[in-house]
Amino acid sequence: MKKILIISASPRKGGNSDTLCDQFAKGAAEAGHEVEKIRLAEKKVGYCTGCYACQKLKKCFQNDDANELVEKMLSADVIVLATPVYFYSMDAQLKALIDRSVSRWDDFGRFKGTEFWLVITAADESREMMSATLEGLRGFMRDCMDGSIERGVIYGTGAYEKGAIRNLPAFQEAYEAGKSC
């Protein structure tokens, strides 16, 4: 049994990337894994101020949900990072959490062997339009979390209206990805 953490950065509950998170969770739960889904829109995560007080404190001084979320990331076997793409990159909610994880930089060695799934949705039908988002997420994993493993990318292309993803291949792909953990 693996401990799976799903981070949905969609500001819309039931939005397309959030729906894919639910499908992934369904598949993973059916496979017998422990699954926790977190909606960043329901958490308070401020932006990094670049003060680096965290280097002495070993946590961010800001009193919000970021420290708890980063700790959950550090203890997961599998992490799903899901974001809608509005203007060629991950949304602000996910970027803020990634930036705030710098507070635990010294602990990033704990990500060795952690498996990552990336879920990216967009109205555009081109995967190429998602390349900046994908590179940002991969850079975070590759350059910051040495030894982490990218298990796969689920592309929810062509999904504009809320719920449109249910009629696209990514809907089933997310479920199957969750089952494969």
Image (cartoon, grey):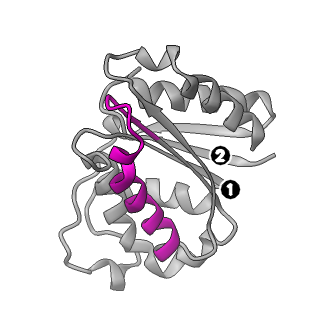
Where is mark 1, residue-wise?
77
- Which residue does the image show at 57% across and 24% down from the upper left? 169
* Secondary structure mostly taken by the magenta-highlighted segment of the chain: helix
Residue at figure coordinates x 53%, y 72% from the top left: 145
Picture layout, residue 94 above or below residue 86: below
State the image quarter where residue 48 is shown: bottom left
Q: Can residue 75 be seen in this view?
A: yes
Residue 52: percent from the left, percent from the top?
26, 80
The three-letter code of the residue at mark 1 reads Asp
Q: Over which residues does the magenta segment extend?
A: 120-143
Whole-percent x and y of residue 23?
Answer: 60, 26
* Amino acid on which disc 2 is placed: Ile
Q: Can residue 67 be seen in this view?
A: no
Q: Say which of 36 and 88 sits in front.
A: 88
- 177 up-or-down from 150: above or below: above
Instruction: Determine whether label 2 and label 1 are within 8 Å by CB.
Output: yes
The first of marks 2 and 1 along the sequence is 2
For the C terminus, the quadrant is: top right
Mark 2, secondary structure of its residue: strand
The one nearer the camera, 67 or 164, is 164
Quickly name the residue at label 2.
Answer: 4
Residue 124 drawn at (x, y percent): 32, 32
Is the residue marked by circle 2 packed among few (<14), some (14-19), or many (20+) residues within 10 Å?
many
Structural crowding at the residue carrying mark 1, measured as other residues with C-alpha within 10 Å and reported as few (<14), some (14–19) or many (≥20): some
